[in-house]
Amino acid sequence: MKRAREKWLIKGRREKEEQEYHHKRKEAHKIIRNKKKTYMKNVIESIQEDQKHNNTRKMYQTVNQFKKGYQHKFSIIRNKKGELAMNTMAMRKQKYGENILTNY
């Protein structure tokens, strides 16, 4: 798909390249949709099996994980004062800048 798009953009957006790009794009979206359907079926089947086997905890964990979606987890660290601090890129850059200024 990427090569077809590059061809289409480089060669002045000719009709043939445009059709090829759109065709490949449709194929890619179709593959993604099918994979998403199979994933959904597998999740639902695992929930149903957990319910059959009385694994209620695992069943509810799967349901909640599926409902909430992806949740980014932050790693928490302590700073020099012993206070909790979030490990973010901005904080690291700030500390790096402070260290450079104090060393000169």
Image (spheres, rainbow, N blue to C red):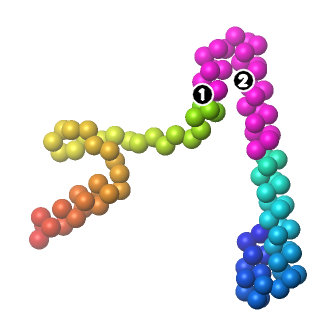
| Residue 29 image offset from top left, x and y in percent | 79, 57
Q: Quadrant of residue 28?
A: bottom right
Vertical arrangement, residue 101 with respect to residue 85, above or below: below
**Please, what secondary structure does the residue beneath circle 1 have?**
helix
Vertical arrangement, residue 46 with respect to residue 1, above or below: above
Pointer 2 residue: 47
Residue type at mark 2: give it: Ile
Q: Residue at x 80, y 65 (%)?
A: 25
Vertical arrangement, residue 4 with respect to residue 93, above or below: below
Image: magenta residue range = 36-64
| In this rendering, the label closer to the viewer, 2 or 1 | 1
Q: Mark 1 Cα within 10 Å, few/some/many (few <14, many 20+)?
A: few
Earlier in the chain: of badge 2 and badge 1, it is 2
**Please, what secondary structure does the residue beneath circle 2 have?**
helix
Q: Residue at x 83, y 85 (%)?
A: 14
User: Along the horizontal axis of the image, is 37 left or right of 67?
Assistant: right
Circle on res. 64: 1
Q: Mark 2 Cα within 10 Å, few/some/many (few <14, many 20+)?
A: some
Q: Residue at x 73, y 86 (%)?
A: 10
Q: Residue at x 77, y 52 (%)?
A: 32
| Residue 75 image offset from top left, x and y in percent | 38, 42
| Residue 37 image offset from top left, x and y in percent | 80, 41
Residue type at mark 1: give it: Asn
Q: Quadrant of residue 39?
A: top right
Q: Quadrant of residue 23?
A: bottom right
Rounded to the nearest angstrom, the CA distance separating label 2 from label 1 is 11 Å
User: Which quarter of the figure is the C terminus placed in?
Assistant: bottom left
Q: Main secondary structure of the magenta part?
A: helix
